[in-house]
Image (spheres, helix red, strand yellow):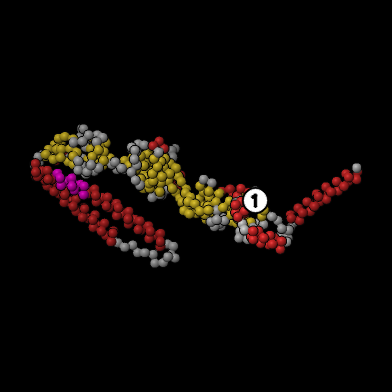
Amino acid sequence: MKTKNYAGRIIGLLIIALVATNSFLIFFDEEGRVEQKSYVEEWSKSTTYNLFERLNVNGVFASDDENEVYFDESIGSFQTFQVEEGQVVQEGDDLYTYQVTDYGTQEAELEGEIDRLEEEIDAIEDYVDELEDYDIPEPESDDDSSDPPSYVETEYLQEADIAEQDAELEKKRAMLDMVQDQLDQLQDDGEEITVTSPYNGTVTDVSKDLQAPLLTLKASSLIVTGELNEEERQQVEQDMPSQVTVEDIELETSGTLTSIHDFPEQVEVQRSSRYPFEVTLEGEAENVLPGYHADVEIITDSAINAVTVLDNVLLTDEDLYAWVMNEQGVLERRAVETGIEEQGLIEVEEGLAEGEWLAAEPKDEFRHQAPFLTPIHLRDLSVKRLLDSELGDWKTYGLFGILSR
């Protein structure tokens, strides 16, 4: 009985000594003569994905433009309104009538106004022609990193300026049509003139007491307005893409941040400053009225087709790194540089390529330049492929296995 106990104790001591010896050999093996292996339970694969940095703010729908119509009491006596509040009018619709008090003076004023508008239209048309005829010099070399951005920016500014001048030209032409119509009425009738609208929109205010402005028209097209706090103002720039959502009516549409104020509406020492912004919509927002509230998502940065990994495969020591299976089939500790993070995904700017395998778990079992062990998941194996293999293949693989021994 005692002999068995002694034998058991000796075996136990030998096992402990063996484990301790191996542990010391591994711990003090600075030259790497003892081969260590890594154990990898879970893997992850890098892929390409589109990532975005988003700033979520609140907004409200508002009219895109507001125009005011005036009446000069010195040119005549006001007669009647031809519109009422809430009425939708188109360009050329009647707005109000007035009685001319001095035919000659009124005719001269209208003719002078026509001449002025025609000169302004000619000047704008000449300017647009100059803009369209101007050829922006292309970069001299593709290697010059300073030229391409400058070229693209100049081209964009040229297109924006042309669009702005075209819009102004349309307004001037509408005003010219309105004044010409008044002159025709004066010359035909000699007494009463009906003023027509140079704008499309909805009449939002009618001044019954004839105080200026006589009428206020708001455009039917909508924009989204809102305010940014001081921190948010630092994150955004003009022309950033945006997404506008109204959950109650299941509306989702795209837009562009077209206006950001550099000055707050109010400046107070004890209160955070607020900076107004406007988002112009790409299309018409159906079933939406001015005053509807919306969620606005401003895209402050983006990475298109970026190499992307799950955030749980990246580790931090002094620098960020990942455990990657390299071409030799061993684990490699590789430093990486990252960019945008979104919903558990991280953009890898340097250090990884698409389709590389990364060890995920258990992290304390990973070793640099070490072969690895990983479990076989039978659910991932195709039994059909195994059974469909030709008998000759089995023999070949079997001989290879025997020879390798």
Tell me, yes or no, if residue 367 can be seen here: no
* Quadrant for the C terminus in the image: bottom right
Residue 335: x and y in percent read 59, 56
When the figure is inspected, residue 352 is found, relative to residue 178, above or below; the finding is below
| Front residue of 25 and 138 | 25
Span of residues in magenta: 173-182
What secondary structure prevails in the magenta region?
helix
Q: Is residue 300 visible?
A: yes
- Nearest the viewer among 401 and 161 is 401
Q: Residue furthest right?
A: 2
Q: Residue at x 28, y 40 (%)?
A: 218
Magenta residue check for 179: yes
Q: Residue furthest front?
A: 391
Residue 195 horizontal/vertical position (percent): 17, 41
> Mark 1 is on which residue type?
Ile
In what quadrant of the picture does the N terminus appear? top right
The residue located at (21%, 32%) in the rendering is: 208
Residue 194 is drawn in which quadrant? Answer: top left
Q: Position of residue 23 (x, y in %)?
A: 76, 53
- Identify whether 125 is placed above or below 85: below
Residue 169 in the figure: left or right of residue 288: left
Q: Secondary structure at mark 1?
A: loop
Q: Which residue is mark 1?
A: 376
Residue 319's spot in the image, x, y percent? Answer: 59, 53
Residue 357, quarter of picture? bottom right
Label 1 packing within 10 angstroms: few (<14), some (14-19), many (20+): few
**Residue for point 18% across, 36% down:** 82
Residue at the spot 40% in from the left edge and 42% down from the top edge: 252
| Side of 360 where 218 appears, left or right | left
